[in-house]
Amino acid sequence: MTLGKAIFVISPEVMAEKLETGLAITKLGTERVVILNATGCSIWNLLDGQKTLDLLISSLATQFELTPAAISQDVNDFIDRLLAAGLIVEKYQ
């Protein structure tokens, strides 16, 4: 799915706990825990409800010294998985 202009925010039903090497995320009312590595944390930390997905990808590309085209599909897939798990929601303006 190409989400480009969409803006996402962390669900208010999510608890996150910082780990030594990442982040543990749980949706309240479930027993499922998602562990994010450092790259996943970089994406998670940009989900502030202000940046479009295109801007988020551009920021990550700069951070990791890659082109947006090189990471776009992976970031879109990651966002899709977070959405499907109910860990983030699309912010409607």
Image: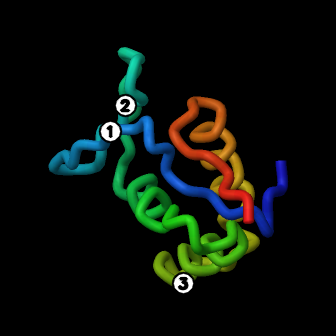
Labels 2 and 1 touching (C-beta < 8 A): yes
**How many angstroms separate mark 2 from mark 1 (CA)?**
5 Å
The amino acid at mark 2 is Thr
**How many angstroms separate mark 3 from mark 1 (CA)?**
28 Å
**Which numbered disc flags the more N-terminal residue, 3 or 1?**
1
The amino acid at mark 3 is Thr
Q: Secondary structure at mark 3?
A: helix
Residue shown at 66%/77% (left/top)? 55
The percent coordinates of residue 42 (x first, y second) are 42, 63
Label annotation for residue 15: 1
The percent coordinates of residue 36 (x first, y second) are 38, 44
Which residue occupies the foreground of this view, 91 or 38?
91
Quarter of the view holding residue 33: top left
What residue did someone put label 3 on?
62
The percent coordinates of residue 69 (x first, y second) are 75, 72
Q: Give the vertical position of 5 relative to 20 (above or below).
A: below
**How many angstroms separate mark 2 from mark 3 (CA)?**
29 Å
Query: Dot 3: few (<14), some (14–19), or many (≥20) neighbours within 10 Å?
Result: few
Label annotation for residue 26: 2
**Which numbered disc flags the more N-terminal residue, 2 or 3?**
2
Query: Dot 1: few (<14), some (14–19), or many (≥20) neighbours within 10 Å?
Result: some
Which residue occupies the foreground of this view, 80 or 13?
13
Say whether residue 7 is left or right of residue 65: right
